[in-house]
Amino acid sequence: MQLLPDYRCALFGKPERPAICVSLRPTEEMCGTCREEAMASLSQLERLTAPKVEAGGRLRPVSGSRESAR
């Protein structure tokens, strides 16, 4: 995960920040009721949206990312 020691997003305001992050809004459904539930949700989102490695070691951007919009 791209978190700073104080749990803020390390990619906030940077061009490599995925486009999907702009649309995320904290809700109980997404964040749960405690930090552990929130981290579990974020971990799952990260796994589901991680770039896939193609043959030859090339990364294939996840759809919806700024990289795939190019």
Image (spheres, rainbow, N blue to C red):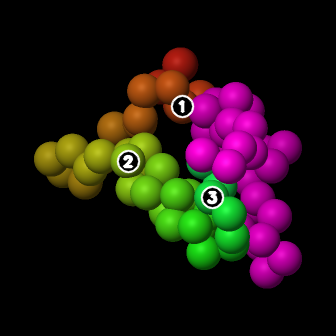
Q: Looking at the picture, how far across and down is residue 32, in whole percent?
A: 62, 58
Q: Earlier in the sequence, mark 1 or mark 3?
A: 3
Quarter in which the N terminus is drawn: bottom right
Does residue 37 appear anywhere in the picture?
yes
Q: CA distance from mark 2 to mark 3?
A: 18 Å
At 71% from the left and 44% from the top, the residue drawn is: 27
Is 45 or 60 nearer to us in this picture? 45
Q: Horizontal placement of 64 versus 9: left or right?
A: left
Q: Secondary structure at mark 2?
A: helix
Question: Which image quadrant for residue 34?
Answer: bottom right
Q: Amino acid at mark 1?
A: Ser
Is residue 52 shown above or below 68?
below
Q: Looking at the picture, how far across and down is residue 67, in whole percent?
A: 53, 31
Residue at label 3? 32
Q: Secondary structure at mark 3?
A: loop
Q: CA distance from mark 1 to mark 2?
A: 13 Å
Q: Are marks 1 and 2 in contact (CB under 8 Å)?
A: no
Q: Tell me if residue 20 is in the magenta stretch.
A: yes
Q: Which residues are magenta?
A: 1-29
Q: Amino acid at mark 2?
A: Leu
Is residue 33 shown above or below 5?
above
Residue at label 2? 48
Is 66 or 1 nearer to us in this picture? 1
Q: Are marks 1 and 3 in contact (CB under 8 Å)?
A: no
At 79% from the left and 80% from the top, the residue drawn is: 5
Is 38 or 24 nearer to us in this picture? 38
